[in-house]
Image: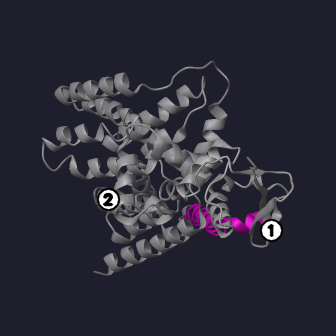
Amino acid sequence: MKKYFILFLIIGLDVLFLLYETSQLSIGYSEVSLLNGGFSVLKYIENFSFYIFGQNDLALRLPMIILHISSALLLFHLSKRYLKYDRDRIWLVVVFILLPGVLSSSIVVNSAGLVIFSLFLYLNLYSINPYFKYLLLIPIWFVSPSIIFLYLGLTFYSIKEKDYKFALFNIILFSSSLYVNGFDTTGLPKGHFLDTLAIYAAIFTPIVFVYVFYILYRRYVTSREDILWYISSTALLISLLLSFRQRLHLEDFAPYILVALPIAAQTFYHSYRVRLKQFRGTYKTIFIISFLFLLLNATVVLFNKYIYIILDNPKEHFAYDMHIAKDLASKLKEKNITCVNANNKKLQLRLKFYGIDFCKDSTLTSSKRKESKLVTISYKGHKVYRSYVTKINK
């Protein structure tokens, strides 16, 4: 009973953190593009949320928060197969929710959060019934084009287990997804390999990524590959190979690396506990440093608007593209302006989400004109946006 109290306390704090961040962010252009784009499972989930709660920031981000919390609980359950003690599994969940990439996917509307949830759900259910491992893969086909890496990983795993029927089934799903959705493999060698490693390090923090990479390699040389290893290693290897010729969208690959967390935690705790207490110092140091990095990242995300104080150019802020729009819409409404020509396609679409439509009666400009109204936005006492609203005389 105590373990569940601690687990839900942690998740409760996580939810409060995410709800606070929801109040601080505006809709981003990539999110608007998804909502206005073609067929997408996530798009229909978002539209259902808007139908229930109305078109607002909470309705926009609530599905991602729910998927994130569900993924954390699924990871806790999945780790039973790898971690003996409840406290180890709780620490694994804490590390998971603090990872930079996971924090991002838990609040930013993109396919990564849905893919993470789908992967953990499948891995929890596939062994319950022999038919589940087939049936569950069919609805997952619609989740995201990047789900092809799950089919590919399962194909290699099935061949290793000599389950050739399942391998053929995954090959069919892989081929059909690739045919319908495609996957960009164009480009010339441009040396993005190091960039890819750097982004992975940013998504997972350097120590965690290096350790997961080491564990995947160690499992290979000791012939201890399991289904988690095949899914993670396949996606990681493909991303590294493709990075030699093109810049990748690593949100397509990063969810698969997360699948390796249970085996990484299993190896870490086993290596730690087989040693006498006086020889555990190195492992304690690695864990403490990693955890401090995770806490530092979470703190930066929580108080990210204070970063504007030290920046000469506000646009250099890592979250600038997720700010401004909501506050600008509020400022315009205060001036009884409900439509405007933003002279910026991305900003125009973002403003529309907050009820500011396009029209030619008013325009946003960077320079002052006759009878212009000044609009400024400040965070923590520091101006981050300024423009003039000019009425156009017809």
Secondary structure under badge 2? helix
Residue named by callout 2: 74
Q: Is residue 254 visible?
A: no
Please indicate whether residue 129 sits to the left or right of residue 44 in the image: left
Query: Does 298 appear in magenta?
Result: yes
Looking at the figure, which quarter contains the N terminus?
bottom left
Please indicate whether residue 138 sits to the left or right of residue 40 in the image: left
**Whole-percent x, y for residue 350 in the image:** 59, 51
State which quadrant residue 64 falls in: bottom left
Q: Residue at x 69, y 44 (%)?
A: 344
Q: Amino acid at mark 2?
A: Leu
Query: Does 14 appear in magenta?
Result: no
Q: Is residue 150 above or below residue 101?
A: above
**Alpha-carbon neighbours of circle 2 within 10 Å: few (<14), some, or many (≥20)?**
many
**Whole-percent x, y for residue 30 in the image:** 55, 45
State which quadrant residue 300 falls in: bottom right
Please indicate whether residue 270 sits to the left or right of residue 340 in the image: left
Q: Is residue 247 above or below residue 297?
A: above
Residue range of the region highlighted in magenta in the rendering: 284-308
Q: Nearer the viewer, residue 390 or 183?
A: 390
Q: Residue at x 63, y 68 (%)?
A: 299
Earlier in the chain: of badge 2 and badge 1, it is 2
**Whole-percent x, y for residue 204 in the image:** 55, 52
Please indicate whether residue 390 sits to the left or right of residue 304 in the image: right
Question: Which numbered disc covers residue 382?
Answer: 1
**Whole-percent x, y for residue 62 in the image:** 42, 63
Q: How many marks?
A: 2
Q: Amino acid at mark 1?
A: His
Q: Are marks 2 and 1 in contact (CB under 8 Å)?
A: no
Q: CA distance from mark 2 to mark 1?
A: 42 Å
